[in-house]
Image: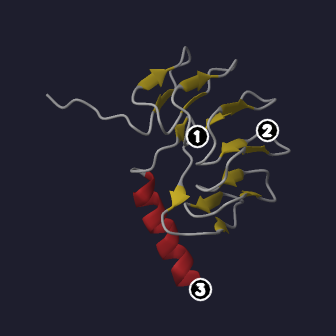
Amino acid sequence: MKRFLIYAFFFGCLGALLLAQTSANSVWRIPGYSSYVELSDGTVFCGEGYGSYHESRTGNVCAGGQYGSYQESRTGEVACGGQYGSYQESHTGKVCAGGQYGSYQESRTGEVACGGQYSGYHKSRTGKVCFGGLYRPAFN
């Protein structure tokens, strides 16, 4: 089981480069996985096929690729599901954008999140950057 979790984490990190939802704190989903993984430090990762959210004991939160809403943790972390078509800003100024969202959102604290259906990028007034799921950089 431990080896499986290590492999899932490793491939999840690699797959995250290809997944849509990105924010100031990148949301990584484990490709082909339909549950969540909570690491010993409280970091959580939700699977691409997971239809819910998970909040860790430390207040970190993840939302699955099949989840159609958002979740805000008790500490103000926020995660948007892959099927969510909007954004959410938490009471602490953290922001997430759903996989079906076609724009970006900048919070009052300068956090940014780009939706999975957004084809551009956004740099906030504080210098934080997000890239939409449909963003394709031009290589000259």
Q: Give the residue drawn at x 67%, y 48%.
A: 68
Q: Position of residue 112 (x, y in %)?
A: 58, 27
* Proximity of marks 1 and 3: CB atoms separated by less than 8 Å: no
Count residues near mark 3 (Cα–Cα under 10 Å), then give few for <14, some for 14-19, many for 20+: few
Q: Give the residue drawn at x 69%, y 67%.
A: 40
**Residue 25: mark in rendering:** 1
Helix, strand or loop at mark 3: loop
Count of all numbered marks drawn on residues in the image: 3
Helix, strand or loop at mark 2: loop
Q: Residue furthest top?
A: 125
Q: Which residue is mark 3?
A: 1
Q: Give the residue drawn at x 54%, y 25%.
A: 104
Q: CA distance from mark 2 to mark 1?
A: 13 Å
The amino acid type found where label 2 is placed reads: Gly
Q: Which residue is mark 2?
A: 76
Q: Nearer the viewer, residue 111 or 131?
A: 131
Mark 1 or 3, nearer chain start: 3
Q: Position of residue 59 (x, y in %)?
A: 79, 50
Mark 2 or 1, nearer chain start: 1
